[in-house]
Image (cartoon, rainbow, N blue to C red):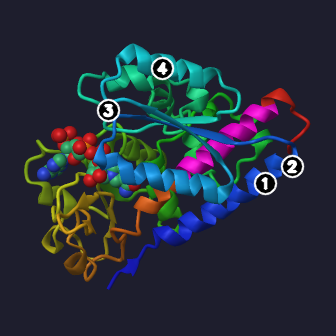
Amino acid sequence: MAVIMDGRKLSEEIKEKVKETVKELNRFKIDVGLAVLRVGENPASTQYYRAILRACQSVGITAYKYDLPENSSVNEILNTIKEINRDERINGLLVLFPLPKNINARRVVNEILPEKDIDGLGSISVGRLAADESSFQILKHGQYNMLNELRFMPSVASFLPCTPFGVIRLLDYYNIDLKGKHAVVIGKSLAVGKPLSMMLLAKEATVTVCHKSTKDLAQFTRQADIICSATGVRGLIKADMVKEGAVVVDIGIIVLDDGRIVGDVEFEEVKEKASYITPVPGGVGPLTIAMLLENTVRSARRNEFMKTPFMLE
Ligand SMILES: NC(=O)c1ccc[n+]([C@@H]2O[C@H](COP(=O)([O-])OP(=O)(O)OC[C@H]3O[C@@H](n4cnc5c(N)ncnc54)[C@H](OP(=O)(O)O)[C@@H]3O)[C@@H](O)[C@H]2O)c1
């Protein structure tokens, strides 16, 4: 029977540290600000939106809400982002997805200044991750202080995408060694699967990435020491696809008609075979918001340090 990896516990610990850092900054009259940009009211992102606002309030981060109508033009969205980029009170900007169908999402995220791209989805942030310039954050996340950050510039000028970074943090929290292990990632989206595969690679795992066109998915998952599934397909990963003692991370979120939330993994049967497993809800989900807050406060410290280097450590 597997150890259940508790994402809520870790996320509370991360949020507690964020709260302390916000307080420390507040003592210097520095406020930490996160902008959340929403276009229209897509029900898929409403719950996430509310959870972010609550989380900001709980750690003392000021949330700036930008609610644009569904029929906004791309120019209106880009102008709003330019305004946020210029606003010194705002340290991070999160654009909620999905955007309306007529809007080019890549054009939108690429308008965000890399210094404020706290979900790491812009091409500069993605490129820095791919070029191993962000590995410092992946490998030493518990150890960076301002002096280290400056030593490793520009690598730390970008932020890592919150959900996959949350997965790495959870694996580290449970002391799961990734070096030389075979990690199979299912899903190759820019927000989750692809950056997660790069982060696992930075940790020196041997990484296989599967997707819709992968033939015989089970053939790959059965070889895996670590399975990370991010598809949104209910029950995709069954016990007979999992090696005895494997670590199973379920990133999928599926909301059922009765309101229950489930993941990609058949939890009850897989937990009997795995050594570690994440539940849904309560696994990776809570970490996404914790990482968003951590990235925002790091952006604030960095920004203030650049203005007044002797103020903070
Ligand atoms: N826990 C969290 O905080 C969090 C955060 C973000 C997302 N999520 C959840 O994670 C899931 C994935 O999110 P996403 O944004 O990455 O979604 P996405 O953009 O829709 O990507 C889904 C990926 O899964 C692959 N896929 C779909 N069906 C598959 C199948 N039958 N076999 C193998 N691969 C398959 C797709 O392959 P192709 O590329 O070939 O189409 C695609 O790469 C969703 O359930 C989402 O709600 C959770």
Name the residue furthest bottom.
1
- The quadrant the C terminus occupies is top right
Asked if 235 appears above or below 83 in the picture, the reply is below
User: Mark 1–mark 3 contact, CB under 8 Å?
Assistant: no
- Secondary structure at badge 4 equals loop
Which three-letter amino acid code belongs to the residue tagged 2?
Arg
> Which residue position is annotated with label 1?
23
Residue 191 in the figure: left or right of residue 257: right
- Residue bearing the label numbered 2: 27
Q: Which element type, helix, strand or loop, lies under badge 2?
A: helix
Q: Nearer the viewer, mark 2 or mark 4?
A: 2
- Residue nearest the viewer, comparing 21 with 152: 21
Give the residue pinned by disc 3.
99
Give the mark nearer the N terminus: 1 vs 3.
Answer: 1
* Label pair 1/2, CB-CB below 8 angstroms: yes
Can residue 250 be seen?
yes
What segment carries the magenta color? 290-305
Task: Kindly report the distance in space between the C-alpha atoms of the residues bearing marks 2 and 4.
Answer: 32 Å
Q: Earlier in the sequence, mark 2 or mark 4?
A: 2
- Between residues 259 and 207, which one lies in front from this camera angle? 259
**194 relative to 138 in the view: left or right:** left
x and y percent of residue 243 in the render? 23, 71
Question: Residue 127: percent from the left, percent from the top?
Answer: 46, 27
**Considering depth in this image, is 215 or 249 the residue closer to the camera?**
249
Outermost residue on the top side: it is 75
Q: Which element is circle 3 on?
A: loop
